[in-house]
Amino acid sequence: MAFKQRVSEFKSALAAKEIDLKHLRRLCFSGIPDGSGTRSVCWKLLLGYLPPEKDLWPETLKRQRSTYKQFVEEIIIEQCKGTKSGKDSKEFDVDHPLNPNPDSQWLAFFKDNEVLLQIDKDCRRLCPDISFFQIATKYPNKKVTTGEDRDFETLRERVLRTHLEASHVNTNRSGLKNFSAPRKIAPEEYFVLGDGEEAHWEVVERILYVYAKLNPGLGYVQGMNEIIGPLYYVFCSDPNPEWQENVEADAFFCFTNLMSEIRDNFIKTLDDSACGIGNMMKSVRNMLKERDIMLYRYLEEQQMRPQFYSFRWLTLLLSQEFALPDVIRVWDSLFADEKRFDFLIYVCCAMHMVIRDQLLAGDFATTMKLLQNYPDIDIHTILSKAIDLKRPRVAAPNQTHQKQKGGLQFKKR
């Protein structure tokens, strides 16, 4: 009955002509009932992709999806024209693959390939516990995957050729060229599907590549694949065929909006700043010191530095600490947090306290293993503890609080 009531509450909230985001946040904070695309719509609203006014949705989606198609056209097609069949004679005289000029398009192309190879490597291992990302999408982007008359290389072809150049061609001591065996794929990596097909991980790869090109100041940083993975998975679960067909564009913009809030965590030069990851790790440690001094002191004695484990917790929004369904449930609360990711600090502190007995009973190696490979615990236990930590601490009855100021004592009313 409770589940049906919550489903009804969400339906009512999303049926309004202008959605009350404050009310929706309260509902989502306690978890979004999965089904009928409810979570997909709620996340798009919470991340600022969809406006509260439902009348604006068709035009907003049409504009954003058209913009993303233009990004793909310019970044993957137009900027790579000539890489498959070669430049025409006039242009070839001006620019060529060995041109050392910093303005050479080929030089930029090769640098982009380095980024692409890292994205490809990470996406091939995305969410290995489920088979979803290895499955072919129903809506492959045929414009960039098929067609014999293409004058550009697809991302798949660029990766394959780069590996061929780097791994297949060797020079022996006499200066003679010889070809080695094809590149070996690690057992945990996903294989490429046949022509005309695209696996979901390849779609994610394209999103990340476009994002890196549009954000040269940040580019691609390892771990971003773990941020976009759950977003893309949830949006693909939407039963609306139109939204499924345009999931790539929707996921791109929601990922972009999310990264605009957490990008400082990925910038190394900001680690020790007020907005950097270092300050967040300090906040988790200070909260633990305030709420569980015994556990705090024990971790200090063990020299268990936050960089060893909470760096990953905070940077990747706990996406690697739990199974995907649990990550999605945690993100319901994180996205609904009006102060955005303040609740993440409470969740991280709760993660310490929920396993405090195990931590206190172990040595350095045991403690490290527990924190770096968090045990399988009901996610609702952790979230309940985090909510308890979030509530203001109430003073005991009849307790008098006194503060010293200027040598005088003041009673707190």
Image (cartoon, rainbow, N blue to C red):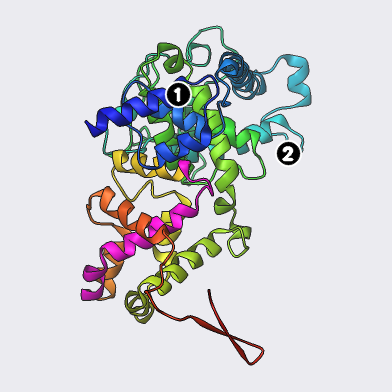
Residue placed most toward the observer, 413 or 75: 413
Whether 123 is among the magenta residues is no
Task: Give the residues drawn in magenta, as a range.
Answer: 336-361
The foreground one among 285 and 173 is 285
Residue, x 58% and y 22% (percent of image)? 53
The prevailing secondary structure element of the residues shown in magenta is: helix
The residue indicated by pointer 1 is 14
Residue 368 can be seen, yes or no: yes
Q: Is residue 395 above or below residue 122?
A: below
Q: From the image, tell me which residue sits under label 2.
A: 100
Q: Nearer the viewer, residue 406 or 349?
A: 406
Residue 129, by quadrant, is top left
User: In the image, which is nearer the foreground, mark 1 or mark 2?
Assistant: 1
* Rendering coords of residue 132 (x, y %): 31, 28
Residue at the image position 36 percent from the left and 42 percent from the top: 30
Are there few (<14), some (14-19), or many (20+) residues within 10 Å of tag 1? some
What distance separates the C-alpha of mark 1 from that of mark 2?
57 Å
Residue type at the position of mark 1: Leu
Query: Which image quadrant is residue 345 in?
Result: bottom left
Looking at the image, residue 153 sits to the left or right of residue 123; the answer is: right
Query: What is the x, y in percent for residue 52?
Result: 56, 26
Q: Position of residue 350 (x, y in %)?
A: 34, 60
> Does the image show residue 169?
no
**In this rendering, would 57 be left or right of 330?**
right
How many labels, in total? 2
> SS of the residue at dot 2?
loop
Is 354 a magenta residue? yes
Callout 2 amino acid: Pro
Rate crowding at label 2 as few (under 14), some (14 to 19) or many (20 or more) other CA atoms within 10 Å.
Answer: few
Q: Secondary structure at mark 1?
A: helix
Residue depicted at x 45% and y 59%: 311
